[in-house]
Amino acid sequence: MKVLIVLIIFSMALALIFLGAFIWAVKRGQYDDSHSPAVRILFDDEVKQTKEEKDK
């Protein structure tokens, strides 16, 4: 039973660490990219040619 309590405490501490890291990343602007998604559709994907197709 004591092991279960230790595991619950450990998992809650780990969850709080990940929550803190997420909040820190949001505050530092890690996810601020409002320009790229709007213009990404305008660019065509380049088709990569194999070496054999380039030699022809």
Image (cartoon, rainbow, N blue to C red):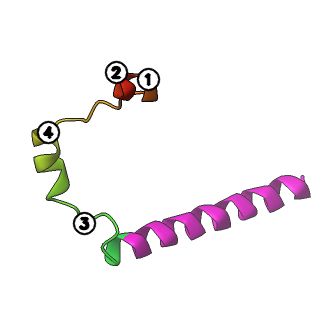
Residue 49 picture location, percent across and down:
36, 28
* Quadrant assignment, res 45: top left
Where is residue 54 drawn, in percent x and y? 35, 29
Q: Specify start and end residues of the magenta stretch as a single range.
A: 1-25
Instruction: Pinpoint residue 21: horizontal percent, then vertical percent.
Output: 50, 71
Amino acid type, mark 2: Lys
CA distance separating discs 3 and 4: 19 Å
The answer to if 21 sits in the magenta stretch is yes
Instruction: From the viewer's perspective, tell me whether residue 12 is left or right of residue 21.
Output: right
**Disc 3 secondary structure class:** loop
* Residue drawn at (17%, 36%) of the image: 44
Q: From the image, state whether disc 2 or disc 4 is nearer to you.
A: 2
Q: Which residue is mark 3?
A: 32
Q: Residue at x 11, y 48 (%)?
A: 39
Q: Which residue is mark 1?
A: 52
Disc ID at residue 41: 4
The amino acid type of the residue labelled 3 equals Asp
Question: Mark 4, mark 1: which one is toward the viewer?
Answer: 1
Residue marked by disc 2: 56
